[in-house]
Image: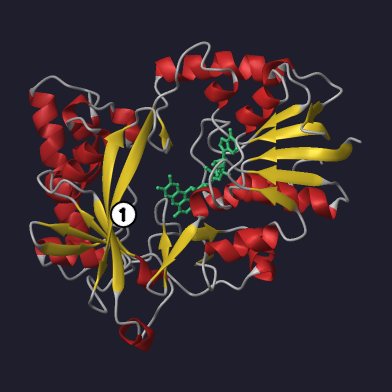
Amino acid sequence: MTNRYDYLIVGSGLFGATFAWHAKRAGKRCVVIDKRPQLGGNLFCEKISGINVHKYGPHIFHTDNGDVWQLVNSIVPFNRFTNSPLANYQGRLYNLPFNMNTFHQMWGVLTPAEAKARIDQQRADVVARMRREGISEPRNLEEQAMLLIGRDIYERLIKGYTEKQWGRPCSELPAFIIKRLPVRFVFDNNYFNDRYQGIPVGGYNRLIDGLLEGVETRTGCDFFDLCRQSGVDPTAMTRYGVTLQGMHFDRVVYTGPIDEFFGYSSGHLAYRTVCFESETLDQANFQGNAVVNYTEREVPYTRIIEHKHFEMFGAEVDACPQTVISREFSAEWTPGHEPYYPVNDDHNSRLLAVYQERAAQLDNVIFGGRLAEYKYYDMAPIMEKVLAMPV
Ligand SMILES: Cc1cc2nc3c(=O)[nH]c(=O)nc-3n(C[C@H](O)[C@H](O)[C@H](O)COP(=O)(O)OP(=O)(O)OC[C@H]3O[C@@H](n4cnc5c(N)ncnc54)[C@H](O)[C@@H]3O)c2cc1C
């Protein structure tokens, strides 16, 4: 006998889990599968020495949308974590984002007027130099960044970090990557401007478990293996849905890579990836902050994450005798690595359009999330998008 479902949701990341929550509330039957051994996609946290380690990169939930904030807090309360990263350049620490603390650390200035005068002077020097060289528009990221913020901040806090992120000198990167650089003339180290931010108390797995409560899930289950085993070509799915291993699904929600869905038939989309080297240390507090960026080119990693600071505050930090840190390295994506950040250049945009055209012809497959849309999304916008979808 065939078991009937409304949706097969491929991927248990935030898109898939939110879709399952939304569909379940509308009375729909869903199965969520994930090829990884655990649920949660990139939000998954692994418990090490009593600390939730953000296995696929540090995640801080932030939003201006009161409805989304209320919804996630109704599933699991969020703590008061405020993202206030630091930058380490040649052994000196600077607050981020660029604000009066940064300017004081950089130049010793005490007032907004002094800081503005410094930045204006440095920008004027860059404009004058470009004029002498007959350049009217910034030709690359280096010129663009110096025009926006001046030489000192560019050289100490932007250049090396950006070159590590992209694997190329800033003078060879296009200017459009940096459209504007937020600068604050107040003493405020809060990275985000959103009204709400925090981390789920007890970690992100609790958010995912809450979204998926009452939904059938299977881990270690690859959609393409299921299709092969059932003799189904996913690219030829009809409006009658699909039957896989005795289960009939009216529709498929696919959150994996869009190029993989079509067997890479037109080529691979490119990604940047990040790799993590994690260590458990026999000390309670390594760097005193969740995120410290290393902005020199010569230090091979881009930042160090100390996971306990996302969820432990005050005396809790010392009460937990160990700490887990992750050094983050930026790299070109090759098959076998996690695809993280899409590369939105002309070649990849054209390739994406080819796949999107084919995807649009499959009425019963919804392509959603960062991999299926080949688009960087923060968590809250993913949820907003799903919650606005008809189910
Ligand atoms: C390093 C990093 C840091 C980030 N930090 C933040 C942050 O601080 N704040 C913020 O708001 N956002 C952050 N984000 C963005 C956040 O990760 C995304 O918004 C979110 O993960 C998107 O969820 P998703 O479901 O689209 O994708 P994913 O989480 O990638 O989920 C997709 C799932 O599909 C599964 N899958 C793929 N193919 C198949 C298949 N064939 N069969 C079965 N399962 C399959 C995968 O295993 C995966 O579990 C960050 C992203 C990165 C890369």
Here the colouring is secondary structure
Residue 122 in sight in this render: yes
- Indicate the position of residue 159 as horizontal and vertical percent values: 17, 42
Q: Nearer the viewer, residue 376 or 124?
A: 376
Residue in the image at 50% along x and 56% along y: 44
Image quadrant occupied by the N terminus: top right
Res. 248 image quadrant: top right
Total labels drawn: 1
The answer to which image quadrant residue 145 occupies is: top left
**Residue situated in front as seen by the camera: 205 or 58:** 205
Is residue 66 at all visible to an observer of this figure?
no
Side of 226 where 172 appears, left or right: left
Where residue 35 appears, as percent x and y from the top left, is 57, 40
Residue 61 shown left or right of residue 301 in the figure: right
Q: Quadrant of the C terminus?
A: top right
Residue occupying image coordinates x 28% and y 41%? 330
Type of the residue with mark 1: Val
Estimate the x, y position of residue 20 in percent, counting from the top left: 73, 49
Please name whichever residue, 123 or 5, is drawn nearer the observer in this view of the structure: 5
Residue at mark 1: 183
* Image spot of residue 356 (x, y percent): 61, 19
Q: Residues within 10 Å of mark 1 (few under 14, many from 20)?
A: some
- Relative to 91, residue 180 above or below: above
* Left or right position of 131 against 253: left
**Among the 4 quarters of the image, the one containing residue 140:** top left
Q: In the rendered view, does 322 fall on the left or right side of 312?
A: left
Question: Which SS class for mark 1?
Answer: loop
